[in-house]
Amino acid sequence: MISKKTKYAIKALMVLGRNYGKEPMQIIKIAEEERIPKKFLEQILLEMRNAGILYSKKGAGGGYSLNKAPEDIFLSQIMRLIDGPIALLPCVSLNFYRSCDECTEEHACGIRDTFVDVRNAMLQILNDTSIASLINKEAELGFSLES
């Protein structure tokens, strides 16, 4: 499962994606719109700002905005930034590889081989899914802020 922190990060990016090209949004507005605890959201947005995904402006008219187009922000980036490895086993991770303590012959492990396939299928979807595509998907599914 993805963490609540990652889910909140994606939800906040979607709000900012729908607002892309407009004035920065205040944290409180994002928090209220997505029902995210404000203090928790502050930490998440700061982490994404430090990674270059968001831009922040202080003072009157300040807030957060996307630092790049929603089409250029992918779920795999966000998940790795917030939670680290995407792979379900450390021995199949591309960026956070660790051998399993109990494994003696990794190349002959059926579990590992299966989870490499799982990782590849997940990465295909996560690498191809942008914040813009999530926003579009919600529009297709009939999502409405008024509901």
Image (tube, rainbow, N blue to C red):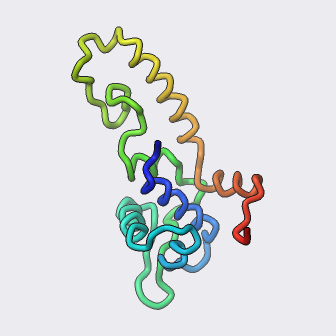
The residue shown at (44%, 80%) is 57
Using the image as rendered, state which of residue 95 and residue 34 is in the foreground: 34
Which quadrant of the figure contains the C terminus?
bottom right
> Which residue reaches farthest bottom?
60
Q: Is residue 38 left or right of residue 22?
A: left
Q: Position of residue 7 (x, y in %)?
A: 50, 54
Q: Is residue 93 left or right of residue 20?
A: left
Q: Position of residue 20 (x, y in %)?
A: 60, 69
Is the residue 53 above or below the residue 133 in the image?
Answer: below
- Tally the numbered discs: 0
Is the residue 20 above or below the residue 11 in the image?
Answer: below
Using the image as rendered, state which of residue 69 and residue 103 is in the foreground: 103
Using the image as rendered, state which of residue 31 and residue 136 is in the foreground: 31
Q: Position of residue 66 (x, y in %)?
A: 52, 66
Q: Position of residue 27 (x, y in %)?
A: 47, 76
The residue shown at (34%, 12%) is 107
Using the image as rendered, state which of residue 24 and residue 141 is in the foreground: 141
Is the residue 120 above or below the residue 14 in the image?
Answer: above
> To which quarter of the image does residue 21 belong?
bottom right
The residue shown at (28%, 10%) is 105
The residue shown at (42%, 38%) is 86
> To which quarter of the image does residue 29 belong?
bottom right
Is the residue 37 above or below the residue 51 in the image?
Answer: below
